[in-house]
Amino acid sequence: MATLLTVILNWRTPEMTLRSAEAALRAMAGIPGAITIVDNDSGDGSFERISSELAARGWDRGAVPVRVLQSGRNGGFGAGNNHGIRAGLPGGARPDYVYLLNSDAFPAPGAIRALLDHLERHPGTGFAGSFIQGEDGAPHRTAFRFPSIPGEFEGHIRFGPVSRLLHRHVVARPIPQATMRVDWLAGASLMMRQDVLDRIGLFDETFFLYFEETDLCRRAARAGWPTDYVLESRVTHIGSVSTGMKTWRRIPGFWLDSRLHYFSKNHGRAYALAATLAAAAGGALWRLRLLVQKRERGDPPRFLRDMLAHHFRHGFRISGERANTPRQPALAGQGRES
């Protein structure tokens, strides 16, 4: 029977992480494997709190053992999850599948089994992800197309006729009504074949936060391993607990770094520049509409200026090089908006 490693990344949310692990334990009933919680160098006592709770609840000795590892650095979402994946199952055994679960995401009892069964039935599929809903039951958009120049223009102009014209490039797909193939999925609830990770590698740790799962799904697709959205797998996700994305006053540098690195790495510097200019053009036209229409702007203050300034400061380095000096912002890389 296939074995499964569930990895949950914690950064200063120990109580919520334990709640997520408890939901994962219920959902892994009857599935051989283990749960690894990775503390991303929280520095607030999270590691000690989680360790003591695992022992007190007996989770470290259960049929599906739960352990907590200390990453030793806050390297972001990809680096933290890589730490847990590299550790493997307790004792160092290699799992057949790896399941990533955000610390603010809670799988329904059959959610993990649904992903595992899907991948077992479809050996040509590399990754599978869940239907995500909020605590209010409202579905979240978590199924996407890969970013592109037309997609950047469409996403920033926010104009119905343009969206209809460029419908094949719209990044955020309508919420699927059935299990289907997609380009990439948000990493709040994502299962991956270990065989695929062995072939294409783990997360690119140049991404501190955002775009890392986009890049990983793209590398898998290029290697012939597509991603599927599995409607039957249901997960409740709060979103933005660690990042504070919903209240950003300015677009963070790490988001701009990740966006630039994604386009430069996957398409080259010229394409990255064209994507930024397309986004700026669409955003400028949107702001002209706002002069006569009372609507929410939809992005943080100075967004276009910050994006353009960032690109022209850092966008002409060698593709694949980190777009900016590595930083350690007070964010975990989990609990992102889906």
Image (spheres, helix red, strand yellow):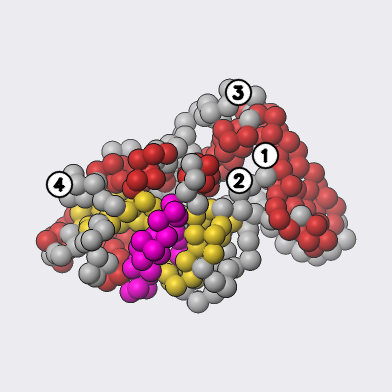
Of the residues under marks 1 and 2, which one precedes in the sequence?
2
Residue under numbered circle 1: 307
Residue under numbered circle 3: 317
Residue under numbered circle 4: 91
Three-letter code, disc 1:
Met
Query: Mark 3 packing: few (<14 Cα in 10 Å), some, or many (20+)?
Result: few
Three-letter code, disc 4:
Gly
Q: Marks 1 and 3: in contact by CB < 8 Å?
A: no
Magenta highlight on residue 229 = no
Secondary structure of residue under mark 1: helix
CA–CA distance between discs 2 and 4? 42 Å
Q: Position of residue 177 (x, y in %)?
A: 57, 73
CA–CA distance between discs 3 and 2? 21 Å
Q: Determine the residue positioned at 62% across, 28% down.
A: 314
CA–CA distance between discs 4 and 3? 42 Å
Horizontal side of 292 relative to 78 (left or right) equals right
Q: Which residues are magenta?
A: 104-132
Q: What residue occupies the far right of the structure in this picture?
A: 292
Of the residues under marks 1 and 4, which one precedes in the sequence?
4
Q: Is the N terminus in the top left, top right, bottom left or bottom right quadrant? A: bottom left
Q: Marks 3 and 4: in contact by CB < 8 Å?
A: no
